[in-house]
Image (cartoon, rainbow, N blue to C red):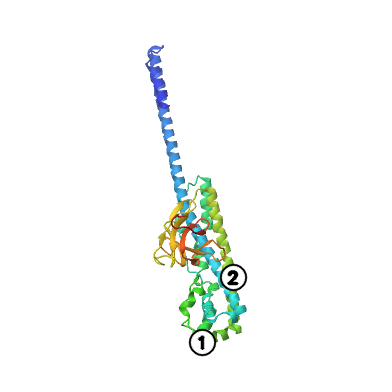
Amino acid sequence: MIKFFRHIRKRLLSENPPGGRAGKFSKYLIYAIGEIVLVVIGILIALQVNNWNEKRKNENLFKVTLDHLYTSIKVDLDILHYYQNTIKDQIVMIDEIIENADNIESQFLINMLFYIETDPNLYSSETSFHLSNLRFDPSNKTQNNVAKRITTFLNNEWWNDYFSSSNKRRENYIEPILKEAEIPIILASFGFSPIDNIPLYTHIFGQKDIDDVRRLNKSRKFQNALNTLKANKIFLRDGLITFIEDRKFMLADIKKYYPEVQMLFENIGIVGNALETGWFKSVPMTLIDEKEAIWEIKIHLNKGRFKFRANDSWTQNWGENSYSSGSLQMNGRDIPVEEGFYLIRVNLSNNDYSIKSINKNSGN
């Protein structure tokens, strides 16, 4: 368009001016002014285009960081659900010991007593790191509001405070009594069910240990310790609700601002004794839906158990959710399977999975 107007002005300038030299000077002056105006317009257009490009670049960068934040917050949420469900299991076990200890198998009972006092380890969340990389345009009201809400709700210092060893709600009450009675002490792990522990510790507890534990369990001191432990576990369980709801809110808020946000999990595979590679090497799955983070694999499995994990590492792994059939839980229980050829699919956006027996030759 600028070239078009410039062409018109040149043509007018080349025509004989009706007013002689004065008219010609007037045309030269108009031409010069027009040239200046066109240059200014060109500069303004260039600046506007550059501004649009910068805004688009900043918006894309903002959304890429939101992808990382969304994934990290989702992992945090999964971990919190895992903590909450595991603490629920511990409370159920405490009730069982208080109300029905005589009917619990002796080795299982002793394992339960050590397990119910275990607490979550400090979890190293990546959310703070990704939050530090969030760059937004202060003049963009929507970006500003999203960033402000994320920063407000995702203060990760609660993590260290809530699960700190100095938290009085995490004091041990049962172990000191068992230690005083010279019962062998075992190192139970949070989330590692006593059902899995029994084969490892049956040789440790003799008949005298069993008799002493049965006797201790009937004492007022021991019952008070169990009730105190239960109250503290309930406090920890209920305290997680706020953290869980905050993260659900943030995921929904990010999704509202950026509907195309996607999970950034990589290298999902399955691992377990149902596979030839055992528990040490994952067999990679195929990504079939990047936006929804859906992966699948067709594979022969032996009778055994397996789990899903990312990057051939136990840092991020998913197992069976004991509170919801067909759904996954971060650090959940091993998934049992019979021998056969299967199509296995996992959806990490919805935390669900499916195992379908198929014909090996036809593949369906």
Instruction: Classify 10 Å Cα crowding around label 2: few (below 14), some (14-19), many (20 and above).
Output: some
Residue 33 visible in this rendered orientation of the protein: no
Label at residue 142? none
The kind of residue tagged 2 is Ile
Per the image, label 1 sits on a secondary structure element best described as: helix
* Relative side of 276 to 155, left or right: left
* Residue drawn at 42 percent across, 38 percent down: 50
Q: In which quarter of the image is residue 219?
A: bottom right
* Residue drawn at 44 percent across, 48 percent down: 61
Decide which of 114, 304 is in the foreground and name it: 304
> Considering only order in the chain, which callout, 1 or 2, is on the residue closer to the N terminus?
1
Residue 92 visible in this rendered orientation of the protein: yes
Mark 2 vs mark 1, CA separation in Å: 33 Å
Say which residue label 1 marks: 207
Position of residue 163 measured from the top left corner of the image (x, y, whole percent): 51, 68
Q: Quadrant of residue 244?
A: bottom right
Say which residue label 2 marks: 234
The kind of residue tagged 1 is Gln
Q: Are marks 2 and 1 in contact (CB under 8 Å)?
A: no
Is 88 rendered above or below residue 65? below
Work out which residue is located at the far right of the displayed protein and give it: 99
Decide which of 339, 191 is in the foreground and name it: 339
Position of residue 164 measured from the top left corner of the image (x, y, whole percent): 50, 70
Per the image, label 2 sits on a secondary structure element best described as: helix
Decide which of 214, 104 is in the foreground and name it: 104
Position of residue 227 measured from the top left corner of the image (x, y, whole percent): 60, 77
